[in-house]
Amino acid sequence: MSVSDPIADMLTKVRNAVQARFEKVDIVTSKTKLEIIKIMKNEGYIKNFKKHTEDGKNYIRIFLKYDEKSEPVIHGIKRLSTPGRRYYTGYKTMPRVFNGLGVLLVSTSQGITTGKKAQDKKMGGELICSIW
């Protein structure tokens, strides 16, 4: 069965794994997913990730991060733009996630970046998701 929105599927797998307190989760590889995961790693929402091959398919294994009380670092993930409803914004009207405590992922003409970096470069784009 084909997935109509692979990014939303990835975010749902991560959200479900965090709620179930899993140590890791595997998702199918794509360039866009890999860029999103790199940003999640740089912002401190996941421990690490690695690419591996299983049964001829390429996967990304995400190692989830928890604090000293075994509470997840990721409190929520929300998909903003969908295949049926694209959500674009300029750098002047870039929304903030939890008053700056969360991260907004934006697809710009120079690749996927965070909302703060896009504002600093004065670039708008398609809002992919928010993580807090």
Image (spheres, helix red, strand yellow):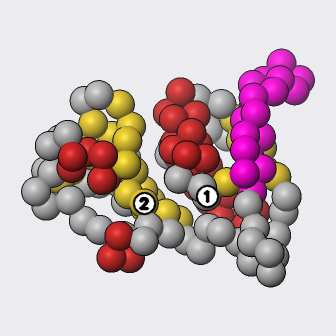
Can residue 78 be spotted in the picture? no
| Residue 92 percent location from the top left of the image | 10, 57
Q: Residues within 10 Å of mark 1 (few under 14, many from 20)?
A: many
Q: Which residue is situated farthest in the right direction here?
A: 55
Which mark identifies residue 45?
A: 1
Residue 49 magenta: yes
| Residue 37 percent location from the top left of the image | 58, 43
Of labels 2 and 1, earlier in sequence is 1
Q: Which residues are magenta?
A: 47-64
Residue 58 magenta: yes
**66 w.r.t. 111: above or below:** below
**Mark 2 to mark 1 CA distance (whole Å):** 10 Å
Residue marked by disc 2: 103
Q: Nearer the viewer, residue 82 or 75?
A: 75
- Horizontal arrangement in the rendering, residue 105 relative to residue 72 (left or right): left
Q: Amino acid at mark 2?
A: Val
Q: Residues within 10 Å of mark 2 (few under 14, many from 20)?
A: many
Which mark identifies residue 78?
A: none
- Quarter-of-image position of residue 52: top right
- Quarter-of-image position of residue 118: top left
Q: Secondary structure at mark 2?
A: strand
Q: Provide the major secondary structure of the magenta segment.
A: strand
Can residue 29 be spotted in the picture? yes
Q: Nearer the viewer, residue 26 or 67?
A: 67
| Residue 84 percent location from the top left of the image | 33, 51
| Residue 115 percent location from the top left of the image | 31, 53
- Quarter-of-image position of residue 30: top right
